[in-house]
Image (tube, helix red, strand yellow):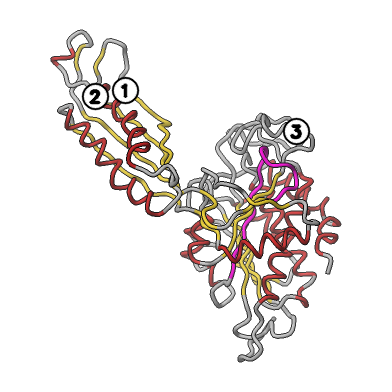
Amino acid sequence: MDLLEDAHSMGGDLADLRRALHREPEVGLTLPRTQARVLAALEGLPLETSTGTRTTSVTAVLRGRAPHATDARSPVVLLRGDMDALPVHEQVDVPFRSRLDGAMHACGHDLHTSMLVGAARLLSAHRDHLAGDVVFMFQPGEEGYDGAGVMIDEGVLDAAGRRADAAYGLHVFSSAVPQGRFLTRPGTMMAASDELHVTVHGAGGHGSAPHRAKDPVPALAEMVTALQTLVTRRFDAFDPVVVTVGQLHAGTKANVIPDEAWFEATVRTFSPEARARMQAEAPALVERIGQAHGLEATARYVGQYPVTVNDVDETAFAADTLREVFDGTRHEQMAVPLGGSEDFSRVLAAVPGSFVFLGAASDGADLATAPFNHSPLAHFDDAVLADGAAAYAELATRRLARTTPTTAPSRTVA
């Protein structure tokens, strides 16, 4: 099999699919047009396809036909591609620019979806060489909606009739990483993401007489800076924590003391231990500051995605595979984790696997200054689509070949 050559032969079709998805981005868990395009792109392939009930997901199972593939204990590999867009108004001047105001594929999920379709086509064409089954996980709602959690609840990890043995995901970058370069690392790959919501309750009054009111603003300001001190004085610098206040609001006019003030912050941690400590200590800190000012502060710590942790053995296998397939020059190990978060972390918490980054910046772009993912100016190059599809397919094919049982009851393959 030359999956890479076959992938490049379908590069034009994958680019057409990616651009069609890009023109009509959809946000959240309900992506009816995207789901319809994926189902149409998979039509005619020998797949067992199902859709979600709580979200417009697509799950497709390919049954391998190599010797022992029909064994009841033959391995299963899961490949994931997310499909949702962001509530961002696109500013990139391309022929396939988003037709929908306020929605854009600014994180490259249109590429992920197209790559996974390409992998499904490649592996279907080489079904006789697959020593097990492949689950294709087309997921909505990665951008803050926990679509992976929903799909796991609906059984995607067991879609082949038994739990997946390994799982792999790809994610493109619009800058920072050279086009076509793959990056991964064992252990912590991405941070956990949570939110801290704080409201300080005071008593309003005239700005000229703060002693007759209970001003929540100074307490709020103290909380914002105290959270940074908490990070630097209570947590190990080698197990970092990042707190960023993204929203802050108080009052309506310069000479009016408001009744209350509030802020919301994102909290990024890189270990389960640091995450648990922040969940306990950050709310306690702001509540006590409120008490010190004679005010009531209510804090709500909202859990989102856990730490993304790559399995050591699966990541070593993925790195070896990518080096072999792409001539040893296009894979490197990341030195440190990324501060972003991913709901693929939920898959990796249940199934050993690896998450891999792929550079998709425009050829010749200045990687230091090109707009990064989530920017309205983020631009991803279709040139990486075939390589992404081949990477998915090679990881599945080779991982299935690693563990093939010799004896077990057979099962029926359609």
**Which residue is identified by label 3?**
365
Element at badge 1?
strand
Amino acid type assigned to the residue bearing label 3 in the image? Ala
The residues colored magenta run 166-182
Residue 310: image quadrant is bottom right
- Residue at (85% x, 60% y) in the render: 5
Which three-letter amino acid code belongs to the residue tagged 1?
Ala
Mark 2 or 3 closer to N-term?
2
Q: Which residue is mark 1?
A: 250
Q: Nearer the viewer, residue 278 or 360?
A: 278
Within 10 Å of disc 2 (Cα), the crowding (few <14, some 14-19, many 20+) is many
The answer to whether marks 1 and 2 mark residues whose Cβ atoms lie closer than 8 Å is: yes
- How far separated are the C-alphas under marks 2 and 3? 47 Å
Depicted 271 relative to depicted 157: above or below? above
Quarter location, residue 2: bottom right
Q: Residue at x 46, y 64 (%)?
A: 153
In the image, is residue 274 above or below residue 294? below
Q: Nearer the viewer, residue 382 or 313?
A: 313
Dot 1, crowdedness within 10 Å: few (<14), some or many (≥20)? Answer: some
